[in-house]
Image: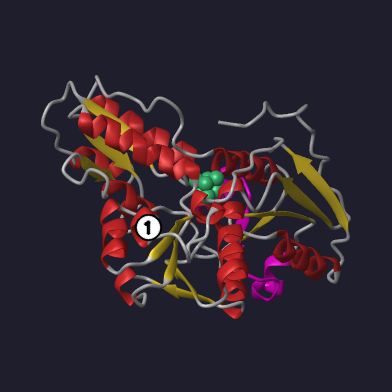
């Protein structure tokens, strides 16, 4: 799902002897990440530290470290948050049981779940209410999958890739639907769906794409870079699903090599051996300041010619979580 049709396809100039960088557009920071990070910043501004955040607000080391310096405390479990405190739920979403645990501890909660993840939760609830078996395509153990599965654990079965499709059991083959994590590889997900359809010909598809616009647009962009770049650098953290998928997409699209780095100083000079064209992009949780530092690092090594390769326009923005529009400190906890 692109937010707008791709603009006029831009031909990427052929490789030349001079060193150059092809810079993807769109890249980095998506609407859901922007909203989640802004929610923590706003909570710090309104209520002062500490503000507890359950799980990394977004999967990016730099963002988490910056918020920590400003007074955010990251925890993995709700039980780690002192009673009566304020806790923000991350962009990846949480299961209903987490809301219940927070209420038991009398926590004031701010739910920064990306609205596009919430959409998948709602689909899961709807199909579970209609008694479908839901095949959730996603990566085992990923925070988002744990949250979505928690909406209807008795109806949801995780399918982690095409090979997993062979092992799935359902109660009624005529009443099966697939949903997916928002940050998967588009190509691999369709392979998984095809494998599931050979087993369950009546398999129902979600009403609209679950893989979000940002994930899809960044994969399209990195594939375009990979047509002309020998080396593709994706700025992003190891635990970022959409960033990892971009590395895979670059390799599948023809890049000789592709690497994921959090910071410019992780780039190995040896990667540049014989490389005239470097493709550069970043995952959906990455602020552009990190891409700028990679551009500086490359310029210091002669890659001064930077060409933007644009494959889509993005204009989506989400408003802050509703809890930030009222005063959590004076609102009775039961009302939150
Ligand atoms: Fe939302 Fe997609 Fe960004 Fe995740 S990657 S926060 S689902 S817009």
Indicate the position of residue 271 as horizontal and vertical percent values: 68, 67
Indicate the position of residue 17 as horizontal and vertical percent values: 87, 53
Q: Residue at x 56, y 52 (%)?
A: 325
Q: Kindly tell me whether residue 129 is visible in this rendering.
A: yes
- Magenta range is 245-273
Numbered disc 1: secondary structure: helix
Q: Is residue 299 magenta?
A: no
Indicate the position of residue 259 as horizontal and vertical percent values: 60, 61
Indicate the position of residue 3 as horizontal and vertical percent values: 63, 31
Q: Residue 25 versus residue 44: which sits nearer the camera?
A: 44
Q: Residue 90 versus residue 24: which sits nearer the camera?
A: 90
Q: Residue at x 23, y 43 (%)?
A: 152
Colour mode?
A: secondary structure
Q: Is residue 256 magenta?
A: yes
Q: Residue 140 versus residue 39: which sits nearer the camera?
A: 39
Q: Residue 293 versus residue 82: which sits nearer the camera?
A: 82
Q: Kindly tell me whether residue 261 is visible in this rendering.
A: no
Q: Which residue is mark 1?
A: 143
Which quadrant, please, contains the C terminus?
bottom left
- Height in image: 271 above or below 13? below
Quadrant of residue 48 in the image? bottom right
As drawn, is 68 to the left or to the right of 81? Answer: right
- Mark 1 surroundings within 10 Å by alpha-carbon count, few (fewer than 14), some (14 through 19), many (20 or more): some
Quadrant of residue 222 in the image? top right
How many dots with numbers?
Answer: 1
- Height in image: 168 above or below 236? above
Which quadrant, please, contains the N terminus?
top right
Asked whether mark 1 lies closer than 8 Å to ligand 1, one says no
Q: Residue at x 67, y 28 (%)?
A: 4
As drawn, is 125 to the left or to the right of 247? Answer: left
């Amino acid at each position: 799902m692109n937010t707008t049709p791709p603009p006029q396809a831009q031909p990427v100039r052929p490789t030349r002897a001079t060193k150059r960088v092809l810079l993807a557009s769109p890249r980095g920071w998506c609407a859901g990440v922007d909203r989640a990070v802004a929610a923590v910043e706003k909570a710090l501004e309104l209520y002062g530290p500490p503000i507890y955040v359950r799980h990394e607000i977004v999967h990016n080391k730099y963002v988490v470290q910056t918020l920590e310096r400003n007074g955010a405390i990251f925890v993995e479990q709700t039980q780690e948050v002192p009673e009566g405190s304020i806790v923000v739920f991350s962009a990846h979403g949480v299961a209903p049981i987490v809301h219940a645990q927070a209420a038991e501890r009398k926590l004031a909660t701010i739910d920064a779940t990306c609205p596009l993840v919430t959409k998948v939760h709602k689909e899961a609830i709807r199909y579970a209410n209609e008694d479908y078996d839901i095949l959730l395509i996603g990566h085992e153990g990923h925070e988002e999958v744990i949250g979505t599965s928690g909406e209807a654990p008795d109806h949801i079965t995780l399918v982690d890739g095409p090979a997993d499709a062979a092992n799935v059991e359902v109660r009624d083959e005529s009443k099966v639907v697939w949903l997916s994590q928002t940050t998967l590889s588009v190509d691999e997900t369709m392979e998984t769906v095809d494998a599931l359809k050979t087993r369950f010909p009546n398999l129902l598809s979600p009403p609209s794409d679950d893989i979000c616009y940002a994930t899809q647009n960044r994969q399209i962009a990195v594939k375009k870079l990979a047509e002309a770049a020998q080396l593709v650098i994706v700025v992003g953290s190891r635990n970022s699903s959409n960033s990892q998928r971009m590395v895979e997409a670059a390799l599948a699209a023809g890049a000789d090599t592709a690497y994921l780095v959090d910071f410019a100083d992780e780039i190995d000079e040896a990667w540049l051996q014989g490389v005239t064209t470097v493709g550069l992009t970043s995952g959906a949780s990455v602020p552009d300041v990190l891409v700028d530092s990679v551009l500086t690092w490359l310029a210091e090594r002669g890659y001064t010619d930077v060409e933007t390769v644009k494959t889509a326009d993005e204009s989506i923005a989400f408003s802050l979580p509703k809890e930030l529009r009222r005063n959590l400190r004076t609102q009775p906890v039961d009302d939150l």
